[in-house]
Image (spheres, rainbow, N blue to C red):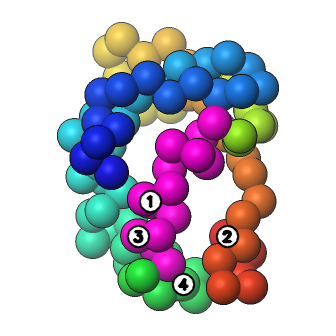
Amino acid sequence: MTPILNQDIKNKEAGVIARISRNGLDKISSKKALDKSLENGFTKEEHFRVGADIKALFETVRLRKTHVDYKGRSGVEAIHRYFTEININNKKA
């Protein structure tokens, strides 16, 4: 994922631009994120395969909802939740 760090990724449907920061990459590859994938029935390899494909996934996701930042972080006006269906080794993710 390092080649896409801090580069624009454009969602084809909404035209929204996103960037994966070092912090975002660290969250994707964190023990907490991996443990959540394992709890949901995915393997470590499947977790990181999806992470590696994050650019293509964001380009095709659909906006599901937008809400205020419940954590009240400074400078965050809203949280956008996107959704897509993907299959990994015949498992819905």
CB-based contact (under 8 Å), mark 2 and mark 4:
yes
The crowding category of the residue bearing disc 2, from other C-alpha atoms within 10 Å (few below 14, some 14 to 19, many at least 20), is some
Q: Amino acid at mark 2?
A: Ala
User: CB atoms at circles 3 and 1 under 8 Å apart?
Assistant: yes
Q: Which residue position is annotated with label 1?
A: 51
Q: The residue tagged with tag 3: helix, strand or loop?
A: helix
The disc labelled 3 sits on which kind of residue? Phe
Q: Residue 69 or 45: which is nearer the viewer? A: 45
Q: Amino acid at mark 4?
A: Phe
Q: Earlier in the sequence, mark 2 or mark 4?
A: 4
Q: Position of residue 19 (x, y in %)?
A: 40, 28
Q: Is residue 50 within the magenta segment?
A: yes
Marks 2 and 1, the one that precedes in the sequence = 1
Residue under label 3: 48
Residue receiving disc 2? 93
- Mark 4 and mark 3 lie on one chain; the one further toward the N terminus is 4
- Density class for disc 3 (Cα within 10 Å; few <14, some 14-19, many ≥20) is some
Q: Mark 2 or mark 3, which is nearer the start of the sequence?
A: 3
Q: Mark yes or no: residue 37 visible.
A: yes
